[in-house]
Amino acid sequence: MAIHVGIIDQDPVRLVTALLHRKFKAEKVIFIGVECQLQQYEQLSKVLTPKGIITEFFQIPSDINIPLIKSKIVELAERLKQEGAEVCFNASCGLRHRLLTAYEIFRTYHWPIYVIEPFSDELCWLYPYGLEQQQVEDHINISDYLTIFGARCQLQDEDIRSVLDTTIETLGQKWASNAYELGPGLATLNYLATTCRKEQKLDVELSEKQQGYRELKMLIDDLNDAGLSNFENGILTFTNEAARRFANGEWLEWYVHHVVEAIKHDLLTIQDLSLGVQVYRKIGEKEVRNELDVATVVNNKLHIIECKTKGMSSDGDDTLYKLESIRDLLGGLQARAMLVSFRPLRHHDITRATDLGLALIGPDQLADLKTHLHEWFLAAGGTEKASFS
């Protein structure tokens, strides 16, 4: 039996992605960990068991006692030797004193040892010498990724956007390219669409002052021309709920998702993509829900994109800190996050985002959104045009 062994730590994604690499014969994996990591093991097992990979938890002492840790890992190694197993050791994860101890022991048994390089996501052999590095295949999906970090997710069952057909691309591009001019008008349109939602209807009456807004008129004309609304006698009527939600600010996240879908055809490192992902995490007895506007996995790294059509003058720090927190909680050290903002960003927000390691796309870059997103995904590493047989 082909058995892989790895050490659990706070960022165990590379223990999973290596097992999904089809050029490996991974029939079973043994996760080395301490007692408090049993819950992490259970999350890893939830991902791997349905894929036909047997999992086992091998507990070692939590004390920093090298002789004791060494004796436990030797016990595991002797058992595997007696079983005649084909063993590989994944040295990508684990606290240093545990990792070095395990490496030394597995090396003495002359079993292959490899590491998954974080940026390129290449499988690099540490032993035996001379084996060729190879790109790890991209098979982990959003749901698996979130499960590893103790969260469950709910993906959209019904795509309400389908009735909008090509409107998302055409209007999205037009509005995104004219962010500065249309900003005030979109704020009013958002308010009108919100009023419809609160009153559970699709029509709203504009005040005389609102009817005089030039930017709002431009937006309503766009909606009318696209068949998403009708404006008559001062009353704006949305064609359907999808049209109302589009006008209510969701147009930006739908447009961003559409652009990522287009990039996905050319950039093969984008392996999974979803819109409006509902994420649930247990904190004590309470379950906390978050929504990811756009989520994708690129080169085996979770990418989260937050889309904001309103200004951040009052809650900029809250938005950025929340995005950073969600990125770290749901995706570990390799996860990446971006804020796409339709409204201008303050210098303070730009500086804060840089400090937090967040990418930003503001109104100045929205006209060329596809280029900026493509460059961001390229920076996740991996082989752009690679295909796996």
Image (tube, rainbow, N blue to C red):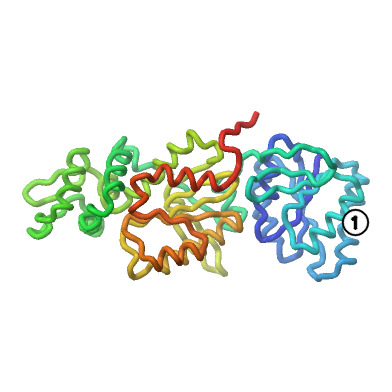
Residue 355: percent from left, percent from top: 50, 65
Residue 380: percent from left, percent from top: 56, 47
Q: Is residue 73 above or below residue 140?
A: below
Quarter of the figure with the N terminus: top right
Q: Nearer the viewer, residue 248 or 213?
A: 213
SS of the residue under disc 1: helix
Residue drawn where x is 81% and y is 70% of the image: 64
Residue drawn where x is 58% and y is 49% of the image: 301
Q: Amino acid at mark 1?
A: Val
Compared across the picture, whether 127 is left or right of 323 comes to right
Residue 80: percent from left, percent from top: 88, 47
Q: Nearer the viewer, residue 185 or 85?
A: 185
Residue drawn where x is 76% and y is 37% of the image: 132
For label 1, the residue is 74
Compared across the picture, whether 290 is left or right of 166 comes to right
Residue 84: percent from left, percent from top: 90, 41
